[in-house]
Amino acid sequence: MKAAEIRQTFLKFFESKGHQIVASSPVVPGDDPTLLFTNAGMNQFKDVFLGFDKRSYSRATTSQKCIRAGGKHNDLDNVGYTARHHTFFEMLGNFSFGDYFKKDAISYAWELLTVHFKLPADKLWVTVYEEDDEAYEIWNKTVGVPAERIVRIGDNKGARYMSDNFWMMGDTGPCGPCTEIFYDHGPDVAGGPPGSAEEDGDRYIEIWNNVFMQFNRTEDGVMHKLPKPSVDTGMGLERLAAVLQHVHSNYEIDLFVALLAAAKSAVDAAGGGDCDKESPSLKVIADHIRACSFTVVDGIIPGNAGRGYVLRRIARRAIRHGYKLGARTPFFHKLVAALAAEMGDAYPELRQAQARVTDVLKQEEERFFQTIATGMEILEAALAKGGNVDGDTAFKLHDTYGFPVDLTADVCRERGVTVDEARFNELLEEQKNRARAAGKFKMAQGLAYSGA
């Protein structure tokens, strides 16, 4: 089952259960200053959950564009090195605003996975919050999951309610226990079940999280029962596709196969010759074109602050990986067409903005290609000395050659060394202070001006 079909099956299933299909919100949150990027399906419904907003429906389902780069949720450093990290991903979700609760949410999830997606029931494990007897009973008695495949997870993060199975929107506000569904890849893959010492292996993969918002936490830490408890669920499309397509890496799913092929041919044509098609650098490029394109679609352009700087960092990181494979002329922007072919049906806004996105990324790429060769020479010279890269070199690369510090750190990581980020930050702070002082000086001069 292809990714597009999985997305459609999910949305249509919940529509058949009385849910309104709601379009994905932009990756740039319009009205939430606390968020750099949309990182979960529930972001666009936050005010509904908080009771500030009312919709014409009490059940919704979405496939949400999400970005996790910068801020609290930052997966940028892991992309290309692991099977499941992305800067951009799609979150499938179903939501109940004071309508159905645990029994229906759990039953829907089970029906969709075992009947419609035909996952073998004996391959599915679930976790519940240790004190959530209600969810445990539903899984065990109603659904029929045997006790040995239901794991209770308590407060495993060092404080009351701090648990992998207790979700909070923030320090205060709606929160509650959650139940997670895992797929067991079988004994040939290393790793243990959730809650065990070996849980970080690849054998048991979390595919779906169902959050039961039943409390409102006040500033004094007290949990007050919500009059109308709600449900918020999230399942990564790429992870589910990997399970349904019988592959172990998200980068092997149909959606990425086409992008990786496009990345290889673009890099090869830009000077890469015939680059290694298994290179992790191609995965970085394929992942990053998604994050960059959707960010530009939603109105962000590369810059030196905030979201614009995150976009610049992601784009330049991808360009550097292409450069590493031999690309010596701009190639990255050429992947927008392949992405639009792959995802334009699900997200028509991508197809509509295709020319603009290509143009914005091309300009950024042309700009960086002017300095990348000299910058890489300086970095190589620093690496040749052996040991870690000093903060002064990292700052020079940042300031003069447009190398974000995480790009320098990315190269260092490949060589098994680190960059002195503390010294880099010190120099960056000094520069900011000088700029502030100069700004004040100009202001003072401006005020003293008395005409010609």
Image: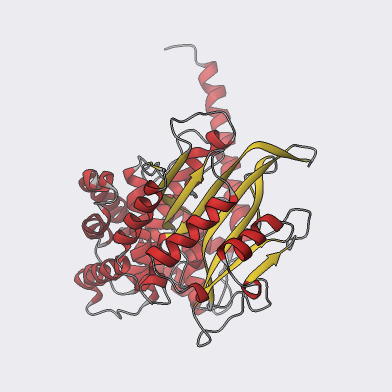
Quadrant in which residue 30 is drawn? top left
Quadrant in which residue 243 is drawn? bottom left
Instruction: Tell me: 144 left or right of 118.
Output: right
Q: Residue at x 58, y 73 (%)?
A: 388
Q: Quadrant of the N terminus?
A: bottom left
Q: Residue at x 45, y 74 (%)?
A: 120
Using the image as rendered, state which of residue 286 and residue 379 is in the foreground: 286
Residue 270: percent from the left, percent from the top?
Answer: 22, 68
Instruction: Tell me: 138 left or right of 273.
Output: right
Residue 225 in view (yes/no): yes
Using the image as rendered, state which of residue 237 and residue 72 is in the foreground: 237
Q: How is the image coloured?
A: secondary structure
Q: Is 321 drawn above or below residue 415 in the view shown?
A: above
Using the image as rendered, state which of residue 327 and residue 182 is in the foreground: 182
Residue 305 in view (yes/no): no
Residue 103: percent from the left, percent from the top?
Answer: 58, 52
Q: Residue at x 38, y 55 (%)?
A: 10
Q: Quadrant of the C terminus?
A: top left
Quadrant in which residue 51 is drawn? top right
Residue 166: percent from the left, percent from the top?
Answer: 67, 54
Residue 211: percent from the left, percent from the top?
Answer: 59, 51
Instruction: Tell me: 345 left or right of 420.
Output: left
